[in-house]
Image (cartoon, helix red, strand yellow):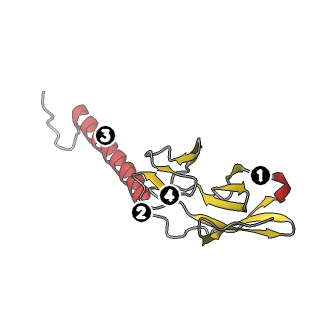
Amino acid sequence: MTNSNPTEVSRRGFLVWLGGLGLLGAAWQTGHVVLQFLLPPLTQPQPEPVRVGPPANFAPDTLNFVPEAVAWLGRDTSGFYALSAVCTHLGCTVRQAGLQFECPCHGSRFNQQGNVLNGPAEAALAFWAVHLDENELVIDVTQAVSADTRLAV
């Protein structure tokens, strides 16, 4: 049976139109999400130094994760140091794995000096400055230092 009135839409035509509209909406949303993933935001929050507490709170020969700084605060015989916990491959947070650090996202491994043991990361982890302010340790994530820099306390 065919429609005699050309302005009437058949049920099948309406469902095809509705399905096309749904596909268009899904494609729009997917494209939006993909673009957000691929393009960085136009403004980035500026990192600030992070206060972590008095030196007495950190025992010798320990390594403590500081989430506010996304860094590992270590204390060895030479003093305090801060090692970035941001993987240099795609920015995932590395975790401690024995005497090494590993990226849970893509498997990069780093030694205790932040050097790459295996990729896909190609650059070493950064070390941040640590200083004392009013008897409180501060990790300065705006100031990179060499891997052998320590704050003697």
Write the residue at 27% across / 37% down.
14
Q: Which x, y percent locates residue 134?
A: 87, 69
Sooner in the amino-acid sequence: mark 3 or mark 4: 3
- The nearer-to-camera label among 3 and 2 is 2
In-image side of 37 versus 10 (left or right): right
Mark 3: secondary structure? helix
Q: Is residue 128 above or below residue 120?
A: below
How many other residues sit within 10 Å of disc 1, few (<14), some (14-19) or many (≥20)? Answer: some
Q: Earlier in the sequence, mark 3 or mark 2?
A: 3
Disc 3 to disc 1, how far (Cα)?
67 Å
From mark 4 to mark 1, how far is it between C-alphas?
22 Å
Q: Residue 3, image x and y in percent?
A: 15, 34
Q: Is residue 12 left or right of residue 102?
A: left
Indicate the quadrant containing the C terminus: top left, top right, bottom left or bottom right.
bottom right
- Cα–Cα span, label 3 and label 4: 56 Å
Would you say the residues marked 2 and 1 are in contact, meaning their CB atoms lie under 8 Å apart?
no
Residue at x 50% of width, y 47% of height: 103
Residue displayed at 31% across by 40% down? 18
Callout 2: 10 Å neighbours few (<14), some, many (20+)? few
| CB under 8 Å between discs 3 and 1 | no
Residue 43 in which image quadrant: bottom right
* Residue under numbered circle 3: 18
Which residue does the numbered mark 1 point to in the structure image?
60
Look at label 3 and name its amino acid: Leu
What's the CA distance linking mark 3 and mark 2? 32 Å
Q: In the image, what residue type sits under mark 1?
A: Pro
The residue under label 2 is: 39
How far is disc 4 from disc 2 in space, using C-alphas?
Answer: 29 Å
Residue placed under numbered mark 4 in the picture: 115
Q: Amino acid at mark 4?
A: Asn
